[in-house]
């Protein structure tokens, strides 16, 4: 069916740990789905968790991720990367640590995170919006702000 987002434009799109859920081969398709939702010169704010968990085994750390995103955003799509910042992402994933035979429980996990801000070029090739079920769910999970 038709996406409820088709034809809408947003000044800011926030992806909070969504892009990383797709393999590097699928990420360009995800970005093709996002780009038509952005207003001309809109801002895309991306938080990518850079740990070596089972779900993100393709990630090789913060510096590798910086280069990977540069290639995806600037090299592939011509977006302008405004800022890249290393920070922590607090995940609601409990962790049990064992130190010298003593167990301790932590309610959250702090993971290395890359925060990137990119702006979209004023023109972008057209693409089908939220065509795939996985992409529709991912796009629906994004937070859209300052709607035009």
Image (tube, grey):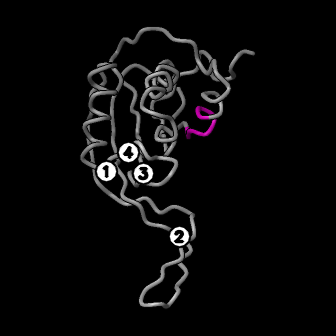
**Distance CA(mark 2)–CA(mark 1):** 20 Å
Classify 10 Å Cα crowding around label 1: few (below 14), some (14-19), many (20 and above). Answer: some
Residue pointed to by mark 4: 59
**Distance CA(mark 2)–CA(mark 3):** 14 Å
**Distance CA(mark 3)–CA(mark 1):** 9 Å
Classify 10 Å Cα crowding around label 2: few (below 14), some (14-19), many (20 and above). Answer: some
Seen in the image, is 20 located left or right of residue 74? right
Check the image and report above or below for 63 versus 111. Answer: above
Q: Secondary structure at mark 1?
A: loop
Residue pointed to by mark 1: 61
Residue pointed to by mark 2: 108
Classify 10 Å Cα crowding around label 3: few (below 14), some (14-19), many (20 and above). Answer: many
On whether residue 60 falls in the magenta region, the answer is no
Check the image and report above or below for 143 versus 61. Answer: above
Q: Name the residue: 49% across, 91% down.
A: 102
**Distance CA(mark 4)–CA(mark 1):** 6 Å
On whether residue 140 falls in the magenta region, the answer is yes
Q: Name the residue: 53% across, 86% down.
A: 103
- Residue furthest to the right: 1
Q: Nearer the viewer, mark 4 or mark 2?
A: 4
Where does the image place residue 46, in percent across and percent down from the top left?
A: 41, 41
**Distance CA(mark 4)–CA(mark 3):** 9 Å
Q: Secondary structure at mark 2?
A: loop
Q: Main secondary structure of the magenta part?
A: helix
Q: Nearer the viewer, mark 4 or mark 3?
A: 4
Whether pointer 4 and pointer 1 mark residues with C-beta atoms closer than 8 Å, the reply is yes
Q: Nearer the viewer, mark 2 or mark 1?
A: 1
Whether pointer 4 and pointer 3 mark residues with C-beta atoms closer than 8 Å, the reply is yes
Residue pointed to by mark 3: 49
């Amino acid at each position: 069916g038709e996406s409820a987002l088709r034809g809408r434009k947003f000044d800011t799109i926030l992806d909070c740990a969504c892009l990383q859920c797709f393999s590097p081969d699928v990420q360009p398709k995800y970005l093709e789905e996002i780009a038509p939702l952005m207003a001309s010169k809109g801002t895309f704010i991306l938080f990518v968790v850079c740990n070596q968990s089972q779900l993100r085994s393709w990630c090789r750390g913060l510096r590798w991720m910086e280069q990977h995103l540069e290639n995806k955003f600037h090299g592939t799509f011509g977006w302008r990367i405004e800022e890249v910042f290393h920070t922590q992402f607090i995940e609601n994933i409990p962790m049990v640590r064992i130190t010298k035979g003593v167990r301790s429980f932590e309610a959250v996990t702090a993971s290395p995170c890359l925060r990137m801000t990119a702006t979209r070029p004023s023109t972008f090739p057209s693409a089908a919006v939220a065509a795939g079920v996985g992409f529709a769910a991912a796009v629906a999970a994004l937070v859209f702000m300052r709607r035009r």
